[in-house]
Amino acid sequence: MLKIENLHASVGGKEILRGINLEIKAGEVHAIMGPNGSGKSTLSAVLAGHPAYTVTEGSVTFCGKDLLAMPPEVRSREGLFLSFQYPVEIPGVSMVNFMRAAVNEHRKHKNLPPLSATDFLKLMREKKEVVELDNRLANRSVNEGFSGGEKKRNEIFQMAMLEPKLSILDETDSGLDIDALRIVASGVNKLKSPDTASIVITHYQRLLDYIVPDVVHILYKGQIVKTAGKELALLLEEKGYDWIKD
Amino acid sequence: MSKDKGHDNISDFTSGDYKYGFTTDVKTDIVKRGLDEGIIRLISEKKQEPEWLLDFRLKAFRHWKTLKMPKWAHLRIPDIDFQAISYYAAPLKKQVNSLDEVDPEILKTFNKLGIPLEEQKRLSGMAVDAVMDSTSVKTTYKEDLAKLGIIFCSISEAVKQYPDLVRKYLGSVVPYTDNFFAALNCAVFTDGSFAYIPKGVRCPVELSTYFRINASNTGQFERTLIVADDDAYVSYLEGCTAPMRDENQLHAAIVEIVANERAEVKYSTVQNWYPGDKDGKGGIYNFVTKRAMCAGENSKVYWTQVETGSALTWKYPSCVLKGDNSIGEFYSVAVTNNYQMADTGTKMIHIGRNTKSRIVSKGISAGHSENSYRGIVRMTSGAENGRNFSQCDSLLLGDKCGAHTFPTIDVHNNTAIVEHEASTSKINEDQLFYCNQRGISTEDAVGLIVNGFAKEVFNKLPMEFAVEAQKLLSISIDNAIG
Amino acid sequence: MILQEYIKLFNEFRSVIESNSSEALNALRESGLQALEGADGKALKEYETDFGLNFQRYTIQNDPYKLFTCDIPNIGAYLYYIVNDTFYANPQQQPLPAGVIICSLKEAAQNHSELVKPYLGRQMHINDNPNEALNAMLAQDGLFVYVPKNVQVEKPIQLVNLMYGNVDIMAVAHNLIVLEEGAKAQVLVCDHSSGKVKYLANRVTEVFVGKNAVYDHYKVENTTEGMTNVCSLLIDQQEGSEVVSNIITLNNCQTLNTIKAGLNAPHASLSLCGMCFLDKTQHVSNDTEILHHKPDTNSFESFKYILDDESKGNFYGMIKVLPDAQKSVAMQTNKNICISNDAQMRTMPQLEIYADDVKCNHGATVGQLDDTALFYMLSRGISKDEAKMLLMSAFVYDVLEKVRIPALKDRLKLLIERRLRKENTSCDSCMICGSKK
């Protein structure tokens, strides 16, 4: 589904990713772990097409297409979803308008007619259940005044609405208490299917207790330095990151 | 404490006296009052100036005669009789070469002002050019600076010694056509300071000028020119005092700064001209044009001013951000009391790409005074990604004063971001009460709170100056309690 | 010079003008004339075209109530038309609440002079403002609204100002709105124009809001190329009165809105908002002045501009808190977005404060749409144009929220969206300017 080859990327002239190679198949959950500054969030931003990052070398193929050639909105419509580490507040834009615009753009991309207002609201109600999102939140402006946990739940809610093929969860566990973590993780698990895949980016092992990865990668100084099964996460938990630095 | 009592206290201690109001008994060479081409030729002759400078003065004078006093400021400017002013006053003794030759009375004056003019004060690390009335009396530290290639002398001396440099830059930032007072200054300026920092040199000491108006019925028209060449750095301090006199005196200065590539200039002013008495009698009319040209890429100019004196202040230290990535900043505390009026602020003209500016203005009004912030931020169409942030706060100490904010934002491109915020309020009574509850008198609490209000600006001043500025603020606001 | 021409024209036709107007309006003409004779002609540069003036009070052949429709679904307003400078009584006038008078100013000045005389012209500054001087000299008619003590007009009063003709026309009109103590009314003014000729409208609206009265004033401009719209809204607020005003410029050519509000008694409160959508070479100036004369007065002001193409925006906002106005609160913001590199915005938020126990602040920004928000939306698959449109709607959202007529708010929401998509913003069912041509 996703194939990253020798990916180099920089921000503000500084090289952060220095040759990433990664392949993800449908049905798989990959965890990417690593110390602060190793390039985890850069990788997710580059995959989503953030304009501040420049790809200097390498290629990314997503479902057989050149991902890097697509603008960010097309990547989304092709089925790539990024759950932001810091979801953006957009005052004045209601969640309903925001999501309806997104869902209908996705439908248009698939040559489907736009959803009627009733069908759309029905869909929203349905999907809200997935993350136990409060009804009130849907009527508020996007992320505005949401607590940290509410913002993350809102990200997973959007993921449920857009039904991506590949979801990238960037530090979705940061700033979450244990209950919120459980809700978010169960939301992600409910959305899991043989046709979809996920990348879980995290600093700590605890999220992986709930979202069990098939493969764990360790990112360090912009390269994947180690790849193994889920036991690698436990090893990291025990030993910390220092041992990979040697 | 009743609220009314609080007001009384504030008006009590906002009536601080002016401690620099002595005159110095020095024999002075004053030319007769009035202004015509003859006087300008006389000034030029007395200063043994070259022809081009006389031409410059005459051109400026002829232009000035076509201009009218600007009326747009929020100031009540009485009619000024420009023929009733003497345009040249110099201490009679001629050029001095060592401190021994300086008139002891002048030395005493500067000692009273606490200026480190004497050699033993060299340790304080300041090079001082002292301008009394119109002429530069003595520049300290000159030889040491010369070793680094730094020129720091009176502008008269610079005209003689470095005519090419002066001719190149004089009037290049503030042309004589700029405004009424600038034209007047160009015609009659008598002295001032000149500093040139050559390429790649960081000036190791603070350069400093002290201005003092001493003779009565004279105007002071000094002119400062600072040029920082590529990669140079200098921090420049300016202080001003004047004796107490019942009649108003005129001060119309020009400061020009040129910052070439990657150069950095900090210009700090503590302005404490005589503000007039409690009833608004006397005091200096301060009409100053200060402007910096950030000519080179990545150049930086910082203006910091603490304005506590003068009966009238009309002053807008500005930056023209011409070089790409250049930065201009303006930090100001303006205190007005009794019948003082101040209309001060800045202009930030963004021309180059990625230019940034920042404005922090703190106005404090007391008594019957009027205190206005006036500013322009302009993003020209070429100023891609220009950024400005302005914060203008006013504090009112008393119910008979005024605090005003008059910004203009003018944007001509779609990549610039300009933000302006302003607030006006009186001293927070909860803060006062909190201090009172901790045993601090209302007077001290007001002092504390006002100093806190202005802190962001004081922090931008060099250490010695910050201390002096805080003291001055105390004198202006809370000295009279004791 | 054109100003002299208007003065000459006035002197020549003065008797005709006066005979077609009323005593109360005629009383202002002399001072207007004198002020203009002493005025600087440059101040009236918009008047340079040779506009026709309707001194003879010619009326249009058709019934405007049949010809034009300014449709806001479900608004259920009391509807009135002023075509150019002439008031057309509504032939199907709904019954008004007891004591309420809505008619032409000319008629009011004749039949209810005791209600007109004490107010008319009182808020004008004829000597300082050439536009008002011209209005005083030439205005012959306008709308008059009177709401007696404690009467609440529940339905909005809608005034449609329509410029309509086949020669260049200047319309000079004067509206007077009086709310007695405890009264309540909402007025919606829709400025429209149709046709290819040049128009100039000079309209002064004076509003007197009595003790504890509540008044809403909305102005929606949707005019065409060739229209110069000079509008003054002058508001006098008494004790405890509450005024909400929203000035919306959806489409225009050249507009100068002058709004002056006097908070003339304690506890008066004012919310003054506005938004402008500009593109091509459109130009809008909003020139506002809020005077806090008395203690415990409150003002909130917010204007937002979105500028595209080579449009120009101006905002001047003066807030004066006078010495007597202790414990006043004034908040002012002006936020602007320049979409194109050739758009220009000039803003001058001004505070003049003479009382110490006050809370006043203002803020102004000129910038662009938030890049992070834009990327967030793109990453959800929303197209760039749609994302921008959503962000621009969001930008003016808080100003729209201040509209207190729900039907109007819904309509505006739709019209703004259409405007931002550069679609037609005229009314659906109008025979003249709308889509059903």
Image (cartoon, grey):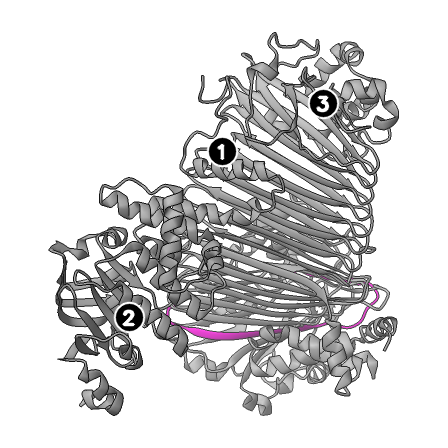
Measuring 47% from the left and 68% from the top, which residue is drawn there? A147
The chain identifier of the residue carrying mark 3 reads C
Give C103 or B373, whichever is nearer the viewer: C103
Where is the N terminus of chain B found, in terms of image quarters? Answer: bottom right
Which residue matches tag 3? C142
Q: Is residue B70 visible?
A: no
Residue B250 is covered by the magenta coloring: yes
- For badge 1, the amino acid type reads Gln
Residue C274 is covered by the magenta coloring: no
Q: Is residue B84 left or right of residue B265?
A: right
**Mark nearer the viewer, 2 or 1:** 2
Q: Which mark is residue C282?
A: 1
Q: Which residues are magenta?
A: B230-252
Have a look at marks 3 and 2 and say if they share a chain.
Answer: no
Q: Is residue A35 above or below residue C207?
A: below
Measuring 46% from the left and 42% from the top, which residue is drawn there? C307
